[in-house]
Amino acid sequence: MNDQTPDSATDIPALMQAMGQRARAAAADLAFASPEAKRRALEAAADIVTARLPDILAANAQDMAFGRDKGLSPAMLDRLELTEDRIAAITAGLRAVAAQDDPVGAVIAEWDRPNGLHIQRVRTPLGVVGVIYESRPNVTADAGALCLKSGNAVILRGGSESFHSSGILVEALRAGLHAADLPEDAIQLVPTRDRAAVRELLTMTDYVDVIVPRGGKGLVGLVQAEARVPVFAHLEGICHVYIDRAADPETALKVTLNAKTRRTGICGAAECLLIHRDVVDSIGQGVIRALLDAGVEVRGDATLQSIPGVTPAQEDDWGREFLDMIIAARVVEDIDAAIAHIRRYGSSHTESILTEDDAAAHRFFQRLDSAILMRNASTQFADGGEFGMGAEIGIATGKMHARGPVGAEQLTSFKYLVTGQGTTRP
């Protein structure tokens, strides 16, 4: 990592241009690195993260103190905190990515033409990826690992509050690259908290091929407004759970509670509960009371306000990412009303239907176009690791190139390899 202190005065444009130049050169070498070398680098990085556990915990304690002084919410502090278990999950993620098949060079399709040409479409790295994110230092390891696996160089710009934790994790990743004789500049962390570095990164079209923003609405809005580099949008996680008239009571209870309360500060946390009118006095009552008993503030519509403890919902509670022990709740007439609500207020992230009716599930899946749609499963499964990707760089909610969890395969493009035998075109 660059030895700049996090708040030191520096020439930001010159700093970022130099990082871009190094990343572009590293990407050219990494693009044809062997799968074995990339695997060795990731496994070595995992070993180093384990060995440096005390250092990572100490660095994270600094970051937590900074976050408290900054006034971060409990949910954001939870995102920031690293524990021994969470660091163990980071190393497990590194090893899982290492063990995956290498996507680079994989043949997506191939065919022969009547003119004698043999054509292959094969996966190829994007080049240089810029990742801008808030709070969560584990994103540092996830993004670094996935970009390495997919043959891309990466420039990481973490949140100011996670500066020290991210710094040590990047040191481990770079040490892994060194151990495998791969270019260390393939993984770089912007060595300053100065926000001017973000704006510079967004315009580095000569060096950066794609930007991946991972954070709240303010960050993503800034990136989309100012970027001249293509963007994989990772918008808010305004995730919905819909309890259908054919829901199983036990499933509805345990899935809804998990979707809301397991971790409130992640993008897969449920933020809105929709209940079919036919079950509001049975399953709905039970679920609402269970949420209240679990300490969740339920902001309900007029029908649900008859339940003691439910507070009135305001218009801006629909389509709001609380990232806290708060959920908006509404009674809907039928599945089509639920679909209409999600279309209006959702962020195209993740929605779950709780039902035993196959036709209802099919209708929900067919008529909504969020990146992830689930049936009888918690929205908290909206995670690349849970999808078997080892890790994720984010949940892409746009419709171009990649959608849903962005893993190593999604960080590739493709090229065509055309083979002839002296073939000419008439």
Image (cartoon, helix red, strand yellow):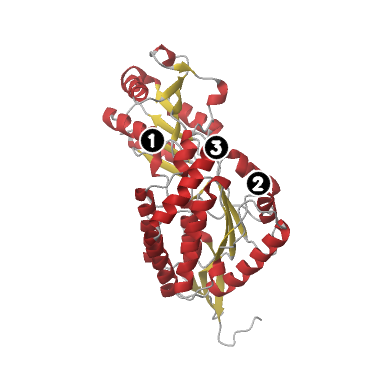
Quadrant of the snapshot with the C terminus: bottom right
Label 3 to label 2: alpha-carbon separation: 29 Å
**Looking at the image, is mark 3 or mark 2 earlier in the sequence?**
3
Residue at which label 2 appears: 224
* Spot occupied by residue 226 in the image (x, y as percentages of width and height): 70, 48
Amino acid of disc 1 = Ala
11 or 185: nearer the eye?
A: 11
Q: Nearer the viewer, mark 1 or mark 3?
A: 3
Q: Is residue 315 above or below residue 217?
A: above
Q: Is residue 273 above or below residue 186?
A: above
Label 1 to label 2: alpha-carbon separation: 29 Å
**Looking at the image, is mark 1 or mark 3 earlier in the sequence?**
3
Q: Is residue 286 above or below residue 76?
A: above
* Spot occupied by residue 114 in the image (x, y as percentages of width and height): 54, 77
Mark 1: secondary structure: helix
Residue displayed at 70% across by 57% down: 10
| Residue 391 visible, this angle | no
Q: Nearer the viewer, mark 3 or mark 2?
A: 3
**Looking at the image, is mark 1 or mark 2 earlier in the sequence?**
2
Asked if the residues shown at circle 3 and circle 2 are in contact, with their CB atoms under 8 angstroms apart, the answer is no
Amino acid of disc 3 = Asp
Mark on residue 69? 3
175 or 250: nearer the eye?
A: 175
Mark on residue 259? 1
Outermost residue on the bottom side: it is 422
Q: Crowding at label 1, few (<14), some or many (≥20) Cα neighbours within 10 Å?
A: many
Residue 192 lies left or right of residue 369; in this view the side is right
| Residue 342 visible, this angle | yes
Label 1 to label 3: alpha-carbon separation: 30 Å
Residue 206 lies left or right of residue 320; in this view the side is right
Outermost residue on the left side: it is 250
* Spot occupied by residue 16 in the image (x, y as percentages of width and height): 67, 60
